[in-house]
Image (cartoon, grey):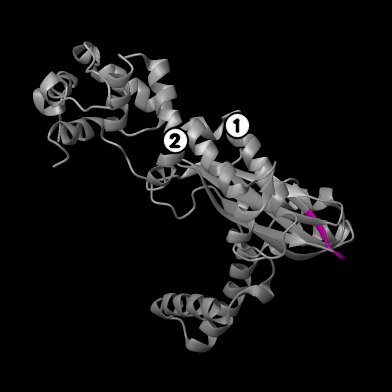
């Protein structure tokens, strides 16, 4: 539906939109005299400031005589009751938080929100760091255990709900992963809060692991070493390369020799240790590790919002739906 701002404005001021005295919602007090002053612009401003639904914003403004600050407080007092409702909204922004301890254990946690604005909010950032530190004390990667963990006298889940009430957006602790322990060296790198990598080595140093983690963030290798590549992946690639070579008319015995060379090149491209190290461009990652007395054990790479389908809001359509009673 393509609607002009003027059309949206008229819809919101129409009787069907609930701005006339006869159909105004009631919160248990006398109807305000400022219904006509609760404009589309006010509703949109409150919605963007709080993340609340449009009907909730309209009702809050009617309850508080159009005062944005009071309406914001009004919505926040109802925040905990609305935390579950906010959970239905798509949270595909957020932050990757990294934490490590003296035992060479490290964790990364992905915590999502709805907008990049909230992803930079100090309260949100403080929450992500607290959750990452709580994850360090856990064995395994069970999310329920993390949500039940204590941070500042409350569980992670209770603190999350309180943050939803304060900020007004859907916030979710989505996943976490850990690496390391006795006998390992772990280093991490987080790029722009959105791409997190942990690299686990045998030997070496945290700095070497962090340097390789930066490479992984940039190049996104599929596997750490060739031994990790499943046979079905190699067979599929081998078939594609064979079919391509046979179509060129070359004899099968020549094709077989060509394919093995191409498979070796394919493995070099998809495996971390055989990729060219991006910081120097003059050696492989494996050679860099060897020079620093380290051997690759594995890596973990997490990207904010990976696999979450983002929804594009249409403000005019949402207003039209509200004005028609949600039909």
Chief secondary structure of the magenta span? loop
Q: Which residues are drawn in magenta?
A: 182-186
Q: Position of residue 225 (x, y in %)?
A: 69, 69
Q: Secondary structure at mark 2?
A: helix
Tell me: residue 190, above or below residue 21: below
Depth order, front residue of 20/90: 20
Q: Nearer the viewer, mark 1 or mark 2?
A: 2
Q: Residue at x 40, y 28 (%)?
A: 75
In the image, is residue 134 part of the stretch drawn in magenta? Answer: no
Classed neighbour count for the residue bearing mark 1: other residues with Cα under 10 Å, few (<14), some (14–19), many (≥20): few
The quarter of the displayed image where residue 221 is located: bottom right
Query: Disc 1 marks which residue?
Result: 123
Left or right of 89 on screen, residue 4: left
Q: Residue at x 59, y 63 (%)?
A: 222
**Is residue 270 something one can see in this rendering?**
yes
Left or right of 15 on screen, residue 41: right
Q: Position of residue 256 (x, y in %)?
A: 54, 84
**Cα separation between marks 1 and 2:** 16 Å
Left or right of 237 on screen, residue 3: left
In the image, is residue 184 part of the stretch drawn in magenta? Answer: yes
From the image, which quarter does the C terminus lie in? top left
**Is residue 284 something one can see in this rendering?**
no
Q: Residue at x 60, y 64 (%)?
A: 270
Numbered-mark total:
2
Q: Tell which residue pokes out farthest to the bottom in this image.
A: 253
Depth order, front residue of 266/148: 148
Badge 1 or badge 2: first in the primary sequence:
2
Query: Disc 2 marks which residue?
Result: 79
Q: Position of residue 10 (x, y in %)?
A: 12, 20
């Amino acid at each position: 539906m393509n609607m002009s701002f003027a059309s949206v404005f008229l819809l919101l001021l129409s009787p069907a939109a609930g701005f006339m005295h006869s159909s105004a919602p009631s919160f248990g007090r006398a109807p305000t005299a400022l219904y006509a002053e609760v404009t589309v612009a006010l509703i949109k401003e409150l919605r963007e400031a709080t993340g609340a639904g449009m009907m909730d914003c309209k009702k809050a403004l009617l309850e508080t005589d159009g005062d944005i600050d009071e309406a914001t407080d009004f919505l926040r007092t109802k925040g905990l009751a609305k935390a579950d409702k906010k959970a239905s909204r798509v949270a595909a922004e957020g932050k990757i938080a990294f934490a490590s301890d003296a035992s060479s254990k490290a964790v990364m946690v992905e915590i999502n929100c709805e907008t990049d604005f909230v992803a930079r909010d100090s309260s949100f950032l403080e929450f992500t760091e607290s959750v990452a530190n709580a994850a360090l004390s856990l064995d395994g990667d069970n999310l329920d255990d993390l949500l039940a963990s204590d941070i500042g006298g409350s569980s992670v889940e209770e603190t999350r709900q309180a943050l939803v009430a304060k900020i007004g957006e859907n916030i979710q602790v989505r996943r976490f992963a850990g690496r390391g322990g006795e006998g390992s060296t772990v280093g991490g790198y987080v790029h722009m809060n959105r791409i997190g990598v942990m690299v686990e080595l045998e030997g070496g140093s945290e700095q070497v692991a962090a340097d390789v983690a930066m490479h992984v963030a940039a190049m996104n290798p599929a596997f750490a070493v060739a031994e990790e590549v499943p046979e079905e992946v190699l067979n599929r690639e081998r078939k594609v390369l064979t079919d391509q070579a046979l179509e060129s008319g070359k004899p099968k015995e020549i094709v077989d020799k060509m394919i093995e060379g191409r498979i070796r090149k394919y493995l070099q491209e998809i495996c971390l240790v055989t990729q060219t190290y991006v910081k120097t461009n003059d050696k492989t990652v494996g050679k860099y590790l060897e020079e620093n007395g380290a051997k690759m054990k594995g890596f973990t790479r997490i990207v904010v919002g990976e696999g979450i389908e983002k929804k594009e809001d249409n403000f005019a359509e949402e207003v039209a739906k509200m004005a028609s009673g949600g039909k």
